[in-house]
Image (cartoon, rainbow, N blue to C red):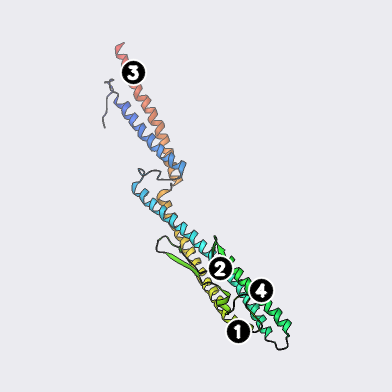
Amino acid sequence: MAFSTGGRINTNIGADQAYAALNDITRDLGVHQLRLATGKRINSASDDASGYVISKKMEGRIRAMTAALDNVGDAQSVYGVAEGALQTIADILTTIQEKQTRAANGAMGTEEKSAIVSEINSLLSEIDDITGQTKFNGTTLLSGGYAQGFQVGESASSILTVSFNSVDTAALLGVAAGSVTTSNIGSLTVEQALSSINTEIGKIGAYVNRLQTKESNITTAITNTEAAKSRIMDADVAKEQIFASKLQILQQTATAQLAQANASPQSFLSLFK
């Protein structure tokens, strides 16, 4: 570092050095004040190039996992809608089974059996209505066969296929709605239909449990990644305040020294009196 005795006034070395020091201090103070204002240690790539790149990768991973978490929620909703409809259908089939058993009572007359047949046909029509009306975002779930993939992880290969078998009264019971008569009521395969529906409900329960596990794992991964990103990106406010206070004091002393260095050549004016 260059020093001057002060005898050469054309170039004030002391003032230049004080000015340079003041600029450095002011620049550093600005960095710490910005960190305090934003709460971030890295506000641009120049602050920490490698840290910036790593944190951006983490941010991308967090956003991908957050989207996957939304997908998990949507898949759970689809399963929930389908499960509710299937449980209602199971209840209806149980009622039909009860009616079928009552119709097998030899003490019943033709009118009573006809009333039971009419009620069963009505219940079968209700099953068809439920099948057609069970939708998610406008897409039917139980009619025509539903099969859609949901990305439930940050990787594009983490696909869970949500699918349901088509529910059709003719396929379930061997007789379509409106076709039940007193002569074929005993041929309704209600027990088999109930078994099929309950199997589907059981599958849904297993998949929902799987999705809940995925939801928990993704949430934990997001939290841990956020914590890692925070250690890189976020400012330690207490530490930054200490640096800022120190630099504010140095800024004041540097300003005072600059003023003093600018005034020191004036002492040589006495040589010309």
Mark 1 lies on a secondary structure that is helix
Q: Amino acid at mark 2?
A: Ala
Left or right placement of residue 190 versus residue 69 in this view: right
Give the side of residue 186 with respect to residue 63, left or right.
Answer: right
Above or below residue 250? Residue 117 is below
Query: Element at badge 2?
Result: helix
Quarter occupied by the C terminus: top left
Mark 3 Cα shell of 10 Å, populated few (<14), some (14-19), many (≥20): few
Distance from label 4 to label 1 (Cα)? 17 Å
Residue flagged by tag 4: what amino acid is it? Ser
Residue type, mark 3 in image: Gln
Dot 3: what SS? helix
Residue pointed to by mark 4: 122
What residue is pinned by disc 1?
Answer: 187
Placement of the N terminus among the 4 image quadrants: top left
- Give me the C-alpha separation between circle 4 and circle 3: 111 Å
Q: Which kind of residue does numbered mark 1 sit on?
A: Ser
Q: Are marks 4 and 2 in contact (CB under 8 Å)?
A: no
Measured from the top left, where is residue 46 in percent x and y? 35, 43
Mark 1 and mark 3 lie on one chain; the one further toward the N terminus is 1
Q: Dot 4, how many residues are within 10 Å of its Cα: few (below 14), some (14-19), or many (20+)?
A: some
User: Foreground: 164 or 83?
Assistant: 164
Q: Which residue is mark 3?
A: 266
